[in-house]
Amino acid sequence: MTPPRRFKDSIYEQFARLGKAISAPKRLELLDLLCQGPRTVEALAEQAGISVANASQHLQVLRAARLVETEKKGLYVEYRLAGDEVCTFFFALRALAESRLAEVEQVARAYFEARGAMEAVESEELARRVRKGEVTVLDVRPPEEYRAGHIPGALSIPIGELKARLKELPKDREVVAYCRGPYCVMAVEAVELLRKKGFTAHRLEQGVIDWRARGWRVEAERPGARR
Amino acid sequence: MTPPRRFKDSIYEQFARLGKAISAPKRLELLDLLCQGPRTVEALAEQAGISVANASQHLQVLRAARLVETEKKGLYVEYRLAGDEVCTFFFALRALAESRLAEVEQVARAYFEARGAMEAVESEELARRVRKGEVTVLDVRPPEEYRAGHIPGALSIPIGELKARLKELPKDREVVAYCRGPYCVMAVEAVELLRKKGFTAHRLEQGVIDWRARGWRVEAERPGARR
DNA sequence: TGACTATTCAAGCGTCCGGTTGAATACTGG
DNA sequence: CCAGTATTCAACCGGACGCTTGAATAGTCA
């Protein structure tokens, strides 16, 4: 084999390492979760709906591709993205999928329409109202994620506690719930519950990361903690 | 299986379609070639060093992922990128690989150093001289690619014809050769040949696409043909 | 030190994937 | 209509991959 051929082969083989790393759906889900913040293997496995051993395996593939890093924290191993570029890249992939694969929109529409949570209100219009403080903003993600960064003025009520903490929400004010992003279902469930209880509720498609990506302000409990 | 789980699974499965498409080295090479401009199956197969049937197979995978499109042109089928976003995405992948995978730089360095073509001159400094017209700029890519877009003032001599057309180059002027980008080897071979023949020659790392990406002017034979 | 536990390793199974080969298809040009 | 050709299809093989199961490892906490 000619030397230039050898060279090209090894270069593209390296590029393909990244491709292989993001070629399994479950790995992408893990990556998405890690974009929200660091987690333990167990948490990742549970949230992605796979066994711990399987999650561990996938995570090692991601680590071999240098997309994630580990750190021992007490009894647990914490996994986190190897850098912000990784998250950026994942978002680029997501954007490309949305723009080129009609199926993504179909699947999303089918699900959200079935749950009756498709927005009548324009996303832009809703974001405007959120920024102006005209509505009660509800962050239904786990508290750690809220702490790492949230939309200014948002209330933190994890989706699991919402039913029991409904009284914290003023009944006469429109509620806008959000979670991790356009494909996160927690806000959808929150809106469903709220409407059943008589609230006027809408779902904000953007997650905190999209929010920040637009250049809008994000509040964090520990200043400097960007994730 | 719970409905949200089903939904997530199908969403990430869609994302993974793109991942799978770029998980094979040869497919990445084909994508890279297509970033330079449309080609026939035969040309792609030859340039990537694989059989025609194999290339056709890979191209269909890329097409299934909506990354490339086909158009029948006379006796040939022309493949081209499905959109500029695809090229952008490929470059994002390349950038991520360069920043996260030390191996890429190692492989590249090993090859270029072995061929003695590692730049003593800084890339920035060289680009400056090219833009000021202080050197003879040589485009060693196939004529079609030159026609689709080249650095202003560049001479088009395909690498295969260089030996026979050396007399077209002024001997007393520094020559700077370029081809498709940092991992394209044609310019390396050109510099090798030129130096052997007594020229002062350097290799410009950037290809036309990188050149344009920096906001610098590109000349095209057919105005409007951006690739 | 010893019990406990989060994580990783190892082996096995079914499936998918990349590449080859040879034939089929579809289209051009005379 | 026919010969020629570019491309695709179909079948096949070896290897890699995803997931499961069960055991091993490494570390913590009492």
Image: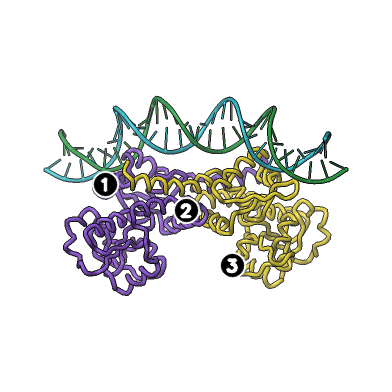
Chain colours: A purple, B yellow, C green, D cyan
Same chain assignment for discs 1 and 2? no
Q: Count the marks: how many?
A: 3
- Name the image quarter holding residue D11: top right
Residue B58 visible in the current orientation: yes
Q: CB under 8 Å between callouts 1 and 3? A: no
Q: Are discs 1 and 3 both within one chain? A: no
Identify the residue shown where x is 31% and y is 63%: A202
Q: Position of residue B183 (x, y in %)?
A: 61, 53
Where residue A156 appears, as percent x and y from the top left, is 24, 62
Q: Earlier in the sequence, mark 2 or mark 3?
A: 2
> What residue is disc 2 on?
B100
Query: Which residue is tagged 1?
Result: A76
Secondary structure beneath label 1: strand
Instruction: Please state which amino acid type lies under the numbered disc 1.
Output: Tyr
Left-right relation of C14 to B91: left
Task: Please state the horizontal and vertical placement of residue B90, each as a whole percent of the image.
Answer: 55, 54
- Taking the spot 70% from the left edge, 44% from the top edge, the residue there is B42
The quadrant in which the N terminus of chain B is found is: top left
Residue shown at 60% from the left, 42% from the top: B58
Circle 1 packing at 10 Å, graded few (<14), some (14-19), many (20+), is few
Q: Nearer the viewer, residue A109 or B92?
A: A109
Q: Are marks 2 and 3 on the same chain?
A: yes
The amino acid pointed to by label 3 is Arg
Figure quadrant of residue A154:
bottom left
Front in this rendered view, residue A24 or B159: A24
Q: Nearer the viewer, residue C15 or A32?
A: C15
* Residue that badge 3 annotates: B214
Q: Amino acid at mark 2?
A: Arg
Give the structural element (helix, strand or loop) at label 3. loop
